[in-house]
Image (cartoon, rainbow, N blue to C red):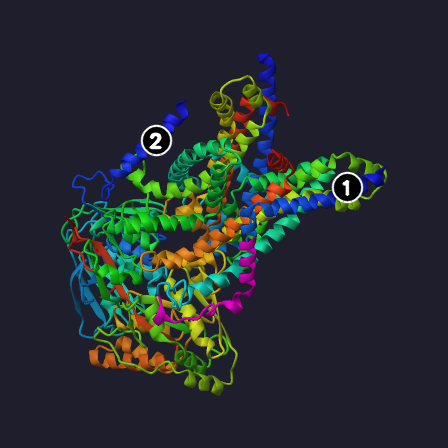
Amino acid sequence: MTDMRLADEASGDESARVASWRLLLGNPVTTISAVVLVGIVVVALTARRIAPYGTNKIDVADALQPPTGAHWFGTDELGRDIFSRVLLAAHASLQIALASVAFAFVVGVTIGVISGYRGGLLDAVLMRVVDVMFAFPVLLLALAIVAILAPGSATTILAIGIVYTPIFARVARASTLSVRVEPFVAVSRTLGTGHLYILGRHILPNIAGPVIVQTSVSLAFAILSEAALSFLGLGIQPPEPSWGRMLFDAQGFVQRAWWMGVFPGAAIFATVLAFNLLGDGLRDVLDPKQRTMIEARRQR
Amino acid sequence: MRRPKVLVGIGLVIAITLTACSTGERVDLGNESSHNLIAAIAGEPDQLDPHKTSAYFSFEVLENVYDTLVEPDENLEMRPALAESWEVSGDQLTWTFHVRQGVTFHDGSPFSADDVVYSYKRIIDQKLSNADRFRAVTDVTAPDKSTVKITVAQPTPNLLSNIGGFKGMAIVQRKNVESGEIATHPIGTGPFAFRSAKSGDSITLAANKNYWGGPPLISGVTFRFIPEASTALSALQAGEIDWTDSIPTQRVEELKTDDSINLGVTPSNDYWYLALNEARKPWNDVRVRRAIAFGIDRHAIVQATSYGTATANQLAIPKGSPWYTEYHGYTLDIAKAKSLLHEAGVKDLTIDMTATSQYPETVTAAQIIADNLAALDITVKIRSMDFAAWLDGENAGNFDMLMMGWLGNIDPDDFYYAQQHTGGKSNAQKYSNPDVDGLLDAARAETNRDARAGLYARAATIVADEASYIYLYNPSVIQAWSKSLAGYQARPDRAIRFRTAALN
Amino acid sequence: MKTFFTSSIVRFLARRLLYSLVVLLGVLIVAFSLVHLVPGDPVRIALGTRYSPDAYQTLRAASGLDRPIVEQFLGYIGSALTGDLGVSFRNGDPVTLTLLDRLPATLSLAVVGIVIALLISVPAGIWAALREGRISDAVVRISSQFGVSIPDFWMGLLLIALFASTLGWLPTSGYQALSDNPAGWLRHVILPGLTVGLVAGAIMTRYIRSALLDVASMGYVRTARSKGLPPWVVTLRHIVRNALIPVLTITGIQLATILGGVIVVEVVFAWPGIGRLVYTAVAARDYPLIQGAVLLIAVLFLLVNLVVDVLYAVVDPRIRLS
């Protein structure tokens, strides 16, 4: 009986996956976001090669030029090409966002899965710890962490990672709980299947959906948080370019050089928006409840 | 339903009020004449004890609360303040000051020569911030209530500027000090009395009607702390404040054509410099330091930090000063820099340069310098931090190179002694040259003006040749005030005096 | 019947309160540890160039850092309960007074922001839920995503550039207390309030929309429809009345979030609130002030969430019994 059940799952998975892709790509907004994101990632990876000028090619005589053919986004107060800096900053921002979300993912999902799977006192204690972390607004806690350690890229990654861990823990735990109560898990246990096997084979694939959605959303907010910290002068330090820091520098030139603030801000906006819309699209596909509704609507 | 109606109602109120906006409401302090001047400064004073603070923000306020025995006029010549007149003995070793009569502190208690003695002894005995300025003084006494006698160990031509250059040597009230209130509730003899302070927001002073120089024409001054230069400026243009010195240099061009405000751009006695830490190798090698001096693009640095408002200078004393010395020892010469480095036998250096967010010019210049020195295969790592941390780093010698400025210099001794003399109080770069020491010490006691000028010229030239400080420029004092503010002018020593200001 | 509900509310309240106290203890531990996690000596670092053996001893004793850690923690809880949050490392002012001084400005901003957010999100959320699946729904969904994704400091700068610098209609910064000058207060609070409100509004629109969709899929709406009532009656009476709960919830949550999240907006607009205070405290490494602010905001956060949960339970019996 168990074997047949597993076989059913296997074929069911296959058609489910095809249907998922179709659903995902069927949504034009999601597709566009995904394409934009891929573009941003490509830019970030190749920035050093494709940027027309270097990171810090200073030419004070050429300072504060408006957008022209030579400088698509204009130049800043030191004569640096803003287009190049926006491209190079993509690398820095994405790197920090990925690193911090990776931290939050690994730590948070581990806590959440263990908590949800074991239950009992461990669950209660871990979840109270998570609740305590939720009691602090994101940027405030990040600032406090930066205050303790010195400002800089490493601290930023740690601060954002710590602050985003609770949400991953909660999402992972909720999904784990819903899978754990499934009958086949109990059956597997009575048959003597090891915990690790159950975790790997049943739990993790099933929590993948909501966790992936959360990853996309958290990446969006990690970029915003890093930009905010850099804007406050506490994140990425000069001369390393960063979108947030470029906005900080642009503050003094709002009248004289509007392009200094508009383009980096737009870059942040576009990236965050793309991650958020992608997350929305993924949620439509991967969140079972929503998905039933969409499919139901389609069949009408 | 009630809910939407309430919301719509609020929306209407907002809309109506928006359309009825005017050009600025002034916050009324409830004074009778309601002529309260609102000045925006870029930061909050750390404390208000003039003998202990060294923050410029504190002195912007304290300039109006306290007096010194003598003070600089518009041309930075020392003139009477609390002292009406003075004589110097024939041997130049005794100065006798006759203090003004009928002066009172803000709490009504009378001022006398005893207060001068108390103030100076406090600075000297407790070795407070400006004790060094009394270095030559052997004794301060008050033979009677209206006379102060200062004896010095050697002729001290700059005694007047030492005791009156700025309010760090202000005459304080004993009771105010002993109660500990001076740091938060200072009591002085100046044109304005401390009234209240709101942490993180403002400090308010009220006019001292019994001021010996005549009552102020305004009822009070409120110093608001607005660290963001552009917001301070916009507030000025909107009429919400009357005065600010928080002006980003890139705005000066457009502000010159702004008819709604008065813009004051005055050459100052400040100077900005780069210093290499000679306690660390290889910066102790003069060839390496000179190489760096030849490797930087001064023109770009001056342009990017001041937008044409500063004057490049390879020595400290500015062009308009009678003590000015010409010096053009350095140019941007990469070839020469490279050969110097080669001679010194160093290559592929790394410089840990500290900058501070409180002075954005340091961050700007650091980036230009990093770009310049890359041509010499020198990697500059910029460490930017808040000012307090920066000061700590400087004091601990935790840097390879830094950029900073000194302000409030009047006498040539102010420009050079503390920074270039071996063991000088401000000699963080640990420069030591016995020839320079000899020149500076002699100049302190030289009463002949021309001879004195010559000594400083020689000392400054050696200092620049050896790149102890790599002098960059003299900035301008840039302040802006509203058209309705009269009787105020920007001063080259950056002292902010509102005692003759009037609001129309 | 009445005693049944009362006792269930009481039991719920008790459980919820106990839970809050546990979390509060955790918050106190975190806030307390901030000073102790600093690598190096926090008093030394904070004094910096103002260091003198005297000042060091005084500050250290005043902050209680010379006592054993458990005693410090208990002392910290004790004083925190009486409202004493220590003294600032920078100027020796009592932290509590400084925080309370700055609270009205932040509250002004938060309230104005929430009002603007409600003005946007309630109509938009309802509209989108009604038009679910259609183009207008997609438009609302996507524009709310725009609002969520836009960096608030960028929006603030753009608003300043447009309305203050270019058009000169509104001031670029500063704050006037409502009690001093209502018109001035309004003029100063508009731009920062808009910045806060637009972003919060976007978040709340999404929440209200999805909460309403949940309601719409609930059985009793279908029942009402099948009873033959005209659709607009169903809309007004059933859906909107049930939307009150999620609107209340998200308003509470957003209010609490804004209290901690206004830091950047306060910096952009030079708004003298708690957010900007934290920012300058971080720059000055004024740990007691940072601790105090973090504690205050977390406590406010907890309080608001508690109130929201209780209201939620009072209105919706199903929550109580779970």
Dot 1 amino acid type: Glu
Nearest the viewer among B239 and C71 is B239
Disc 1 to disc 2: CB gap under 8 Å: no
* Residue C32 lies in quadrant: top right
Is B379 rendered above or below residue C174?
Answer: below
Quadrant where the image shows the C terminus of chain A? top right
Return the residue found at the far top: C1
Percent coordinates x, y for residue B362 in the rendering: 39, 66
Alpha-carbon distance for marks 1 and 2? Answer: 57 Å
Q: Which residues are magenta?
A: A35-64
> Disc number at residue B60?
none
Query: From the viewer's perspective, is B207 left or right of C141?
Result: left
Q: Mark 2 Cα within 10 Å, few/some/many (few <14, many 20+)?
A: some
Query: From the viewer's perspective, is A7 left or right of C289?
Result: right
Residue A286 appears anywhere in the view: yes
Dot 2 amino acid type: Ile
Q: Mark 1 Cα within 10 Å, few/some/many (few <14, many 20+)?
A: few
Q: Is residue A36 magenta?
A: yes
For mark 2, what is the residue? B10
Percent coordinates x, y for residue B48 in the rendering: 32, 52
Main secondary structure found in the magenta portion = helix
> Disc number at residue A9?
1
Residue B406 appears anywhere in the view: no
